[in-house]
Image (cartoon, grey):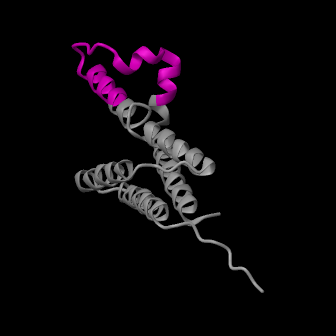
Amino acid sequence: MNTGKRLLRWAGGIMIVLGTVHLTVLALVCWGDITGWVDRGLWAVVAIELADAGQTMQSLQNKVTFWAGPGSFSVPLVLLGCLIWHLAGRGVPVPAGIGWAVAVWCALGGVLVPSPFYGGIVAGLLIVLAARMEARDRRLPPRRPAVRP
């Protein structure tokens, strides 16, 4: 397995793990809210707030749980990780701009909410490194095998 493919596989794996762990931890912490969605229907997530303060707080908790879970960037992060994993397996290079965007997004997220967001910086930089290695390999002339007498 060449180095660029290995780097992309690591980057994809990191993104898949980060997104999956985020969703799993949220499901464990907010299990009551999630089972409430099943009982009341998904409309419970975006329910119109009623005058009763207790119901308003529950509605707010439902919204927070939704936007921290299935509505967050963890789902697209898992999907992007799967795409990068797939592209690496097919030998398709991923543009460095994708890596820079992931790295900057995770750095800003980590500054705003100190969390494992910083792990995404590693994934982004691995994508950038793989793209640079691919560009370098395209510039170099192909190696000819040595002929032994």
Q: Is residue 69 left or right of residue 110?
A: right
Q: Which quadrant of the figure contains the N terminus?
A: bottom right
Which residue is at a point 48% across and 67% down the rendered structure image?
140
Q: Residue at x 37, y 27 (%)?
A: 62
Whether residue 65 sits left or right of residue 4 in the image: it is: left
**Residue 39 placement, left or right of 49:** right
| Residue 147 image position (x, y, % from top left) | 72, 80
* Residue 82 image-quadrant placement: top right
Residue 95: percent from left, percent from top: 41, 49
The reply to whether the magenta stretch includes residue 109 is no
Residue 44: in magenta span: yes
* Magenta highlight range: 34-63
Q: Looking at the image, is 70 positioned above or below residue 84?
A: above
Q: How far across and down, in percent of the image, does residue 101 sit?
A: 32, 48
Residue 21 vs residue 108, the one in the foreground: 108
Residue 121 horizontal/vertical position (percent): 36, 58
Q: Residue at x 51, y 67 (%)?
A: 141
- Is the magenta region chiefly helix, strand or loop? helix
Vertical position of residue 132 compared to residue 108: above or below: below
